[in-house]
Amino acid sequence: MSDTAVNAHLQIHYDTMWDRAFGAIACGDLDYDTHLTAGRDLRRGLTLIARPSQTLRARFDAVLDRLAGSEPQQYRYPASDMHMTILSLFTVTENPAPQLLRLADYRAAVSAALEGIEAIEIDFAGITLSRSAVLARGFPRGPALETLRERLRIQLRDRGLHASLDQRYRLITAHTTLFRFVAPLYGAQGFAALLTSMRDEPLDSMRVDEVELVINDWYMSSNSVERVAIIPLRTPSETL
């Protein structure tokens, strides 16, 4: 599938997310994240992630300044926690011990899947929604991200590590979650108007030169993340 076709499919997916959530948000019908208001999240998972560049983090912060300026009681991701999920190897759970006993097998699966994968380019433009969050929309250039995800799924299945893989949904997007709802909106209609004005604003691009394998809570909180490995991706010249 060409880049144009892939990103057209992603655009439809992001638009569908928006359409499902926007009307509810405009009416103040939110899905509150109760874990964020209950103290430290003790659930843990294992995830392969990429971190946005300093420039992109600054653009995300500018988006958050506007969102938080309208609704300051909600949760904004600090720059240290911003990330794009490549794949959740197992979803956060209150009892991660059985999976973590096989951490070496997970690392081997990641290493095998990454063999020969080039640096990944992703363009971010605009936002989409769920009833619980505001997300920045990412659009990959080329097939590298989806190739990596499919290789990971294969490697995990081959090692019998796929029981909790894609448990919530099959990840196809390249989004970054920026803003979570934890309380009622002060002004739902005004906030909805702000969201509409930001829906298609250009943001910036990121080049994923390295990925991180981390043990994490649901929010990728920096005070909870345990870094297992940082793995560089190949540059195009290295694959010749």
Image: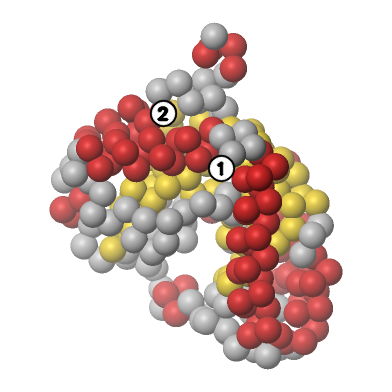
Amino acid at circle 1: Arg
Q: Mark 2 or mark 1, which is nearer the start of the sequence?
A: 1
- Please name the residue shown 68% across and 78% down the image: 22
Residue at the extreme top: 240
Q: Nearer the viewer, mark 1 or mark 2?
A: 2
Q: Report x, y in % for residue 140.
A: 63, 41
CA separation in Å, label 1 and label 2: 17 Å
Q: Quadrant of the N terminus?
A: top right
Q: Which residue is at a point 38% across and 64% down the rendered structure image?
A: 168
Judge from the rendering whether residue 73 lies leftward or rightward of residue 55; answer left or right. left
Instruction: Kindly identify which numbered label has been placed on residue 72.
Output: none
What kind of colouring is applied to the model shown?
secondary structure
SS of the residue under disc 1: loop
Res 231 → quadrant: top left
Q: Is residue 38 left or right of residue 83?
A: left
Which image quarter: residue 113? top left
Label 2 sits on residue: 114
| SS state under label 2 | helix
Which sits in the foreground, 143 or 204? 143
> Residue 49: image x %, image y %?
47, 44
Mark 2 is surrounded, within 10 Å at the Cα level, by few (under 14), some (14 to 19) or many (20 or more) other residues, namely many
Residue type pointed to by label 2: Leu
Relative horizontal placement of residue 146, taking residue 218 as reference (left or right): right
In the rendered structure, the answer to whether residue 198 lies left or right of residue 134 reads: right
Please name the residue that numbered disc 1 is placed on.
51
